[in-house]
Amino acid sequence: MCRSRGARNHCNEDGDCSKVDRSNKQLAGYDEDSNEQSLMYEVLLCPAMNPHLHKEESSARSLCGASSSGLGGKLQKNGQSKGSSGRKARGKNQGNRREVVDLVSLLTQCAQAVVFDSITAYELLKQIRQHSSPKGNGTERMAHYLAEALEARLAGTGRALDASFLSKRLTAAESLAAYLAYVKASPFRKMLNFFANKMIWKLSENATSIHIIDFGIIHGFQWPGLFQNLSQRPGGPPSVRLTGIDFPQPGFRPAERVEETGRRLAYYGKRFNVPFEFNGVVKQWDTIRLEDLKIQRDEVLVVNCLNRMRYVSDDVTVDADSPRDAVLKLINTLNPDLFIHGIVNGSYSAPFFASRFRELLFHSHAAFDMFDAILPLEHEGRMLYERDVLGRAAMSVVACEGTERIIRPETYKQWQIRNTRAGLKQLPLDHDIVEDVRAKVKLGYHEEFAVDEDSNWMLQAWKGRVESAVCCWKAAQ
C-alpha cells in the first residue's frame, strides 16, 4: 500500500531523526561541523562539563548524579493507561454551546469501517477532522495524526511517504528541538542510555580495551556521555572500538549518516582522552556477516541495541528465519560479554489491522497524554516531535502493509521468548543501577512516571502503562 521510497528516511519514536538537512560542504572533521549539530551532543553531557546546557534544563536532562529513594507501584504490563485524561474533545462553537465528542470512540469505529465500509469510514473521518487539530490538546492532536493515517490507508497513498512529507525534512536545529522536547517530557530514552552506559562502565572497570557493537547507532547520542564517564576512571580510560550499524539511507550516499556520526564521536573521544576507533557498517541487518564486525579476542565485547530492533522485519520465508531472528542469532554467535536490549513495549505489529490499530491507539494516547501533562501546547519541539515522530510512526503502522510496514514493536515478554529461542540467556538485573534510574525519574520527571522490574526486565511506565523495557543477555553456551 505504501511505496518503499524513503521508508527509513524519517524520525523514530525515540526522538532520533533518521536524516537532517545539512550544509553542502564535505566534512573534513567534527570541529568543522555546525554549532547546531554539535549541540545535539553537548546537551547529553553532564552539566559541569557542558556550558551550553541551561541551568533550568540540567536536572531533567543530565546523565550524571544519583539519589537513593525509590519509586514503587505495580505497573500494568499491557492495556490502556489508567487515569488517562482527555478522551473527550470539544468541537466548534455552536452559539453558546459546544459539542462534545469522544474521539477515541470515533477513531475506533473508523478503523473498523476502513476494512469493510469505506463510505462510513469517510463519514467518520469527516467528524474526526472537525474536532481534531495538530495544535489542540493531546487527544485532538492524536486524532489528527491517526485520521491522516486512516485516510491514507483508505486512499492507498501512504501519505507519510508523499513528497509533501519528505519536503518537510527536519533541519539540524529542528532535530535538536524535537529530541530535547522528548527527553524533557519523558525519561524513557534518557534512562535507557543511562542504564546501558552504567552496565558498560561496570563491565569495563578493569578492561584495557572494549569493543561496542551498536545496532542502530543513528546519531550516536548515547556515546559522548559514556566517553565522559570512562575518562574519569581511576588509572585512565580503556581504548574503545565502536562498530556503528545503520540501515542504508536513500540517495547516492547510503553511508553518509554513519560516517558523520563516526567523525563526531571521534571528536568526543579526543576531547575526553579516550583512545577511540570507529567502524561503520551500513547494511540490512540480516545480511551482516561476522567478518564485517572485526571481532578481536582480547577485547571486552558489548552488543547494544536500544529501541531499534523493531525496525527489522519479522516476516518469515518458507526456508529461512525471519530477518529479526537472524540478527539475534548473529548476536548469539558473537558470544558477547554483554548484550543490552532496550525495546519500546508495544503489540501493534499484529497482521490483523483492527487489533493493530487498537494497540496503536492505546500507545499513542499515552504518548500524547504525556506531552499534554508536561509541555505547553505551543512548544515548538513538542509539535515537531508529534508531527515527525509520532505522526509518521502512525502512518507506517496504519497505512502500510507487508514489507512496507517498517515499525513492528513487540512486548518485552514476546522479546524474552524470541531472544531465548535464538540461544541467548537472560542475566539478572543490577539492582543498584535500577535504583539509580528510579531515583532519577522521581527527582527529574513527572510523578506519573514509574520504574519497576519484571522477569529481569527494567520497566518504565506512564500512568501504569509500560512503554519501555530493557534487560541484559549473553550467549547461553
Image (cartoon, rainbow, N blue to C red):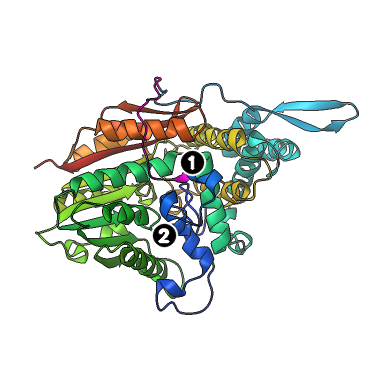
Closer to the chain start, of discs 2 and 1, is: 1
* Residue 364 coordinates in the image, percent (x, y): 54, 37
The residue at the point 26 percent across, 35 percent down is: 416
- Residue kind at label 2, given as amino acid type: His
Q: Is 401 rendered above or below residue 66?
A: below
Check disc 1 and report its element: helix, strand or loop: helix
Q: Residues within 10 Å of mark 1 (few under 14, many from 20)?
A: some
Name the quadrant of the C terminus. Answer: top left
The amino acid type, in three-letter code, at marker 1 is Ala
Residue 433's x, y, as percent? 29, 35
Taking the image as drawn, is residue 275 in sight?
yes
The residue beneath circle 2 is: 219
Examine the structure image and report whether residue 69 is included in the region drawn in magenta.
yes
Judging depth in this view, the residue of 368 and 26 nearest the camera is: 26
Give 421 or 295, whichever is nearer the viewer: 295
Residue at numbered disc 1: 60
- Magenta span main SS: loop
Q: Residue 229 appears at what percent x and percent y?
A: 30, 51
Point out the stretch of residues depicted in magenta.
60-74
Q: Quick check: is 5 in the magenta stretch?
A: no
